[in-house]
Amino acid sequence: MLPSTAKRHPHHGTRLRLRFPDSLSSPLHLLPSAAPIAQWGFFVDVAAAVICVRSGWFLVLMARKQHIAIFTTASLPWMTGTAVNPLFRAAYLAKSGDWEVTLVVPWLSKGDQVLVYPNKMKFNVPGEQEGYVRRWLGEQIGLLPKFDIKFYPGKFSKEKRSILPVGDITQTVSDDKADIAVLEEPEHLTWYHHGRRERNGYFHAFLLKHINSWVTDIYCHKVIRLSAATQDVPRSVVCNVHGVNPKFIEIGKLKHHQISQREQAFFKGAYYIGKMVWSKGYTELVQLLQKHQNELSGLKMELYGSGEDADEVKASAEKLNLDVRVYPGRDHGDSIFHDYKVFINPSTTDVVCTTTAEALAMGKIVICANHPSNEFFKRFPNCHMYNTENEFVRLTMEALAEDPIPLSEELRHELSWEAATHRFVRVADIAPVMSTKQHSPSSQHFMHISPDELKKNMEEASAFLHNAVSGIETARRVFGAIPNTLQPDEQQCKELGWRLQG
């Protein structure tokens, strides 16, 4: 906590500046009663204005909420986690009413759109894509909360199968709104970033998912790891801050009602859904089924997914002496999945598996590995975890023979985006609460450099080095950047309505 300081305003009167914890730092002003409020630019980050009249002075507390900018590397209609989860996060943070929220997503020119978006979908201008995103979100959650959507220029990397930013993405958010930044998939957002490290003293970055320790030290104040399966990095905390689409919870409520009415809620056996590449659990699944065909002789299972290894997975499944069928991928919320009773997911490569959470929300039994990525799900009675292959066989056969345990309201809430948003606010420490406690100035020794100051100086040096290297085209290419992405090109600037630099 920094000490309070009082400064004389150049016009007249005294301006009292209070410093709060860094996550909520804002000035508090005393204004003469005749002074127009607009000219002072005062901000105290609480939710409502309090005006007290004392001897001709206005004590003004607040006029604006803090602003949260959520940066991510994908957008609908690409139905990937880094498009869907940040969208829900923005919506539910905005829905709480405590912050102003902006979702910042990549804009792709048409040449890249055809490589990324399904069904050859194209958008001529960002406004068209924003309309699509908002319509989709409205179909999921109903009445839309108020939040902004802004676009930064991006390019699709075929090698990385990811969208990488072009230029300085922080320019999409004005300085007066640079309070809190949330970076999703930050390794792609920061590794080739060439721009300002912080917009002002109140710009705090919370990085989600696994990232490189170096850029973490440079660009973030706190790291939220979705599970302990991710790399341990400085200033990190483990917490699952994702929720599930509300429609999965509604499906689960319907199944709960059917069970309570003694109706049969589940008519089908076991299934798995996921991108059909071997690394997404299909290697482990096929090996388990192949080694234990005799013990699993009564198993009927369907696999749903699309991907580069689909033909190989299908060929391997056809060689099994089990009733295992392979189908193209589709939305997990599709009615075809409602009646399955058991979701088998042996994958250990996810940070937190979204489909596992969705299956639990729908009231299904889940069979998964006892692995750090599944730690969050241990509290759910329908989640059965195995440590050995024999346990996998036993748990699978038992699940096929028993009924799921109805999910309690408390556990159902834990899967929701309301609960996920609460967890995020808590671990990020950004709750809109103001403390007015003051501390006396601490004595400072001449020429004394504290460990914190030394660490900050080292971080500044690292940031300078990263900024210098990321500004050299040859160096960028050596480290895997897409050529000529230091600044957006003329076409991108035209589509975004930006002024071409240089």
Image: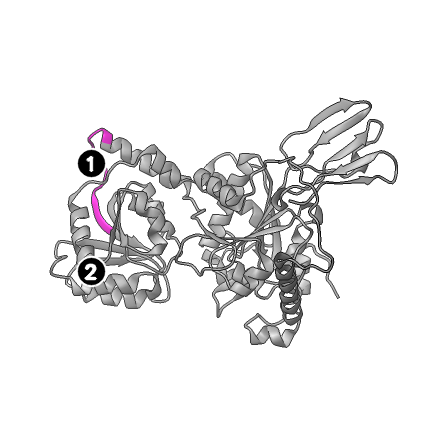
Q: Give the mark nearer the N terminus: 1 vs 2.
A: 1
In the image, residue 152 above or below residue 43? below
Where's residue 149, x and y in %? Answer: 59, 47
Q: Magenta part mainly helix, strand or loop?
A: loop
Where does the N terminus fall, quadrant-wise? top right
The amino acid marked with disc number 1 is: Gln
Judged by depth in the image, the label closer to the viewer, 1 or 2, is 2
For marks 1 and 2, give the CA distance: 31 Å
User: Position of 332 compared to 364: left or right?
Assistant: right
Of 477 and 32, the residue lying toward us: 32
Which residue is depicted at the point 34% across and 33% down? 409
Q: Residue 64 vs residue 285: left or right?
A: right
Quadrant in the rendering for residue 261: top left
User: Picture coordinates of residue 64 (x, y %)?
Assistant: 67, 36
Quadrant in which the C terminus is drawn:
bottom right
The residue singled out by tag 2 in the image is 389
Magenta residues (range): 260-270
- Residue drawn at (23%, 33%) of the image: 259
Question: In the image, what residue occupies the spot 44% across and 39% down?
Answer: 419
Q: Is residue 263 shown in magenta?
A: yes
Along the line of sight, which residue is nearer the eye, 261 or 2?
A: 2
- Write down the residue under mark 1: 264
Q: Is residue 77 visible from the viewing direction of this image?
A: no
> Where is residue 59 drawn, in percent x and y?
74, 29
| Label 2 secondary element | helix
Q: Residues within 10 Å of mark 2 (few under 14, many from 20)?
A: some
Q: Is residue 484 magenta?
A: no
Residue 143 visible in image: yes
